[in-house]
Structure formats: C-alpha cells, structure tokens
Image: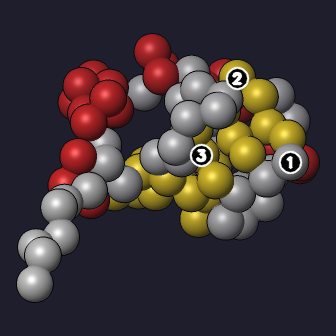
Amino acid sequence: MPLSTIRIEDEVFIRDGETGIGAVREVRPDTLIVYFEGYGDIVIGPEQIASAHDGKVMVRPETLPDDLQARLDHIHDGEYRDTPKA
C-alpha cells in the first residue's frame, strides 16, 4: 500500500461502514503515526493498511499490538452516555 495517497487527519477504520477509531497524525515516507481513540499514537507500516481512499484508512486489525486489538470493539464505549433529563 503506497502511503503517498494518505494525508494528515485522514480517518482510520477497522471496517468500511463503521465508526472511525482514530486519525492519521503524521505521514512519513515508510510509516504513519496514527492516533487511536482512548489508546494513543502508534507507528504503523504499509503492511498494516488494508486500503486507503477518500480520506479513509482501513487498517488490518490483526497486525496491531495485542493490547490495542483487545480494545477495538469497545474503543468508543466511554463516549456514548445517556444525558440526564431535566
């Protein structure tokens, strides 16, 4: 996967059609710095990217660190809270 098509602030996904899980912070010649929600920044290489198009980067979840993989299905859990009614 050529990284030249990826831009800073492109959104990162594990599956097309789902909610994004992070964003590209930096594009280097051979790697990306990606921020994952609730986890932080990690360096990923082209072999960890399934596809990139239209401002979306699909990562290969099985190539990510084990502790991040364990969080992926619940990465947004803390964001959705019921709002108390007045």
Say which residue label 1 marks.
Answer: 54
Kindly give the residue lying farthest to the front in the view shown.
86
Amino acid residing under circle 1: Asp
Horizontal and vertical percent position of residue 69: 32, 26
Amino acid residing under circle 3: Val
Badge 3 crowding class, 10 Å Cα cut-off, few under 14, some 14 to 19, many 20 or more, is many
Is 62 on the left-hand or right-hand side of 56? Answer: left
Q: Considering the numbered disc 3 on the image, is that residue within a helix, a strand or a loop?
A: strand
Please report whichever mark, 2 or 3, sits nearer to the chain's N-terminal start: 3
Q: Considering the numbered disc 1 on the image, is that residue within a helix, a strand or a loop?
A: loop
Report the residue at 85% width, 41% height from top: 53
Say which residue label 2 marks.
Answer: 50
Please report whichever mark, 1 or 3, sits nearer to the chain's N-terminal start: 3
Quadrant showing the N terminus: top right
Say which residue label 3 marks.
Answer: 12
Horizontal and vertical percent position of residue 71: 25, 33
Report the residue at 18% width, 70% height from top: 83
Q: Is residue 38 above or below residue 3?
A: below
What is the spatial separation of the Cα atoms under label 1 and label 3, in whole angstroms?
Answer: 11 Å
What is the spatial separation of the Cα atoms under label 2 and label 1, in whole angstroms?
Answer: 14 Å
